[in-house]
Image (cartoon, helix red, strand yellow):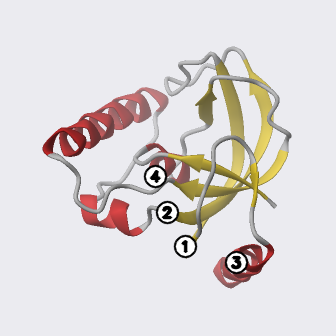
């Protein structure tokens, strides 16, 4: 299984319907990915905290334009899911344009079949990366447990 690391609140938005993830380069293999919420500082500086607040407002504005409802979340809950795999999804295309308000380019990974799981601690990486086998086993177990 491959992984993709995304900063919060953007990873949170993917769990709730953000249909496209912006990237600076193409070349992402299509297929199944573990959604990794990048590590956040345990004690953010005041500037980092206000940057997060601003990003949450941007997420809400984009979601509203797309007709998506992103639930409220606290800093503590976002932090609790940071540095962990929080879901599994499919990357089905890499595009240069997309109708979503979330698309700002230059490339967009089109996301589908996003499934949330209980966070699985894991170190992420830039670019597509391979999820360690022991972590993948836990992720797949949590996926199975979350199926109706």
Report which residue position mark 3 lands on: 147
Residue 38 marker = none
Quarter of the figure that contains the C terminus: bottom right
Numbered circle sitting on residue 121: 1
Q: Is residue 67 left or right of residue 76?
A: right
Would you say the residues marked 4 and 3 are in contact, meaning their CB atoms lie under 8 Å apart?
no
Question: Residue 109, percent across and down?
Answer: 70, 33
| Residue 11 in view of the camera | yes
Cβ atoms at labels 1 and 3 below 8 Å apart? no
Q: Residue at x 80, y 32 (%)?
A: 93
Q: Mark 4 or mark 1: which comes first in sequence?
A: 4
* SS for callout 4: helix
Disc 4 vs disc 2: Cβ atoms closer than 8 Å?
A: no
Identify the residue position indicated by label 2 in the image. 83
The quadrant where residue 141 appears = bottom right
For marks 1 and 3 on the same chain, the one whose residue lies earlier in the sequence: 1
Disc 1 versus disc 3: nearer the observer: 1
Vertical order, 146 against 64 (above or below): below
Q: On screen, 125 above or below 61? A: below
Q: Tell me, yes or no, whether the two marked residues, 1 and 2, touch with CB atoms within 8 Å.
A: yes
How far apart are labels 1 and 3 at the CA level? 21 Å
Q: Give the Cα separation between the discs numbered 4 and 3.
A: 20 Å
- Secondary structure of the residue carrying tag 2 is loop
- According to the picture, the residue beneath numbered tag 4 turns out to be 12
| x, y percent for residue 27 | 82, 29
Residue 78, horizontal then vertical, whole percent: 36, 60
Nearer the N terminus, badge 1 or badge 2?
A: 2
Q: Nearer the viewer, residue 97 or 23?
A: 23
């Amino acid at each position: 299984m491959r992984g993709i690391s995304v900063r919060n609140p953007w990873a949170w938005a993917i769990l709730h319907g953000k249909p496209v993830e912006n990237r600076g380069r193409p070349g992402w293999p299509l297929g199944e990915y573990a959604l990794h919420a990048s590590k956040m500082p345990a004690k953010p500086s005041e500037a980092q905290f206000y940057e997060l607040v601003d990003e949450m407002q941007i997420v809400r504005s984009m979601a509203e334009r797309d007709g998506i409802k992103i639930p409220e979340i606290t800093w503590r809950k976002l932090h609790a899911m940071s540095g962990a795999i929080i879901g599994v999804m499919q990357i089905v295309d890499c595009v240069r344009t997309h109708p979503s308000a979330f698309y700002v380019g230059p490339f967009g990974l089109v996301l589908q079949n996003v499934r949330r799981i209980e966070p699985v601690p894991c170190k992420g990486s830039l670019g597509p990366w391979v999820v360690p086998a022991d972590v993948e086993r836990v992720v797949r177990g949590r996926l199975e447990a979350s199926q109706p």
